[in-house]
Image: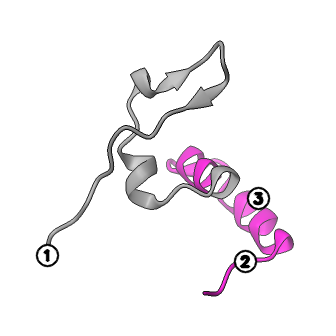
Amino acid sequence: MKTWSMEQCLHFLDTAEGHVHQIVYSLAIHTGMRKGEVLGLRWGDIDWEGKSLMIQQTVTWTP
């Protein structure tokens, strides 16, 4: 599997600044979450006081 270097990640995040999906990209890069996991998040999955996320569901696509 090919992964991005730290420099590539930082460049991507800099480029995504202001993009409507910036938070999705940032969350995926900083947590390692998969696309379906990020898109399956709900507000109730966030523990603001404990500063954590719980993956309760994922989104899948069926062609």
Cα separation, mark 1 vs mark 2, equals 28 Å
Q: How packed is label 3: few (under 14 Cα within 10 Å), some, or many (20 or more)? A: few
Position of the N terminus by quadrant: bottom right
Q: Earlier in the sequence, mark 3 or mark 2?
A: 2
Judged by depth in the image, the label closer to the viewer, 3 or 1, is: 1
**Residue 51 to residue 41: above or below:** above
> In the image shown, does 48 or 12 lie closer to the viewer?
48
User: Left of 54 or right of it: where is 26?
Assistant: right
Label 1 sits on what residue type?
Answer: Pro
Q: Nearer the viewer, mark 3 or mark 2?
A: 2
The kind of residue tagged 3 is Asp
**Badge number at residue 48:** none
SS class, disc 2: loop
Where is mark 3, residue-wise? 14
Q: Which residue is mark 1?
A: 63
* Other-residue count near label 2 (Cα within 10 Å), few / some / many at <14 / 14–19 / ≥20: few
Q: Main secondary structure of the magenta part?
A: helix
Which residue lies at the image location 62% right of the left edge and 58% below the top edge?
Answer: 32
Q: Position of residue 22 (x, y in %)?
A: 59, 49
Indicate how the structure is coloured in the image. one colour
Name the N-terminal-most of marks 3 and 1: 3
Residue 5 among those drawn in magenta? yes
Report crowding for label 1: few under 14, some 14 to 19, many 20 or more residues within 10 A (C-alpha). Answer: few
Q: Which mark is residue 4?
A: 2
Kindly give the residue lying farthest to the right in the view shown: 7
Q: Which residues are magenta?
A: 1-28
- Horizontal arrangement in the rendering, residue 32 relative to residue 46 (left or right): right
Q: Amino acid at mark 2?
A: Trp
Q: CA distance from mark 3 to mark 2?
A: 14 Å
- N-terminal of the pair, mark 1 or mark 2, is 2
Marks 3/1 in contact by CB < 8 Å: the verdict is: no
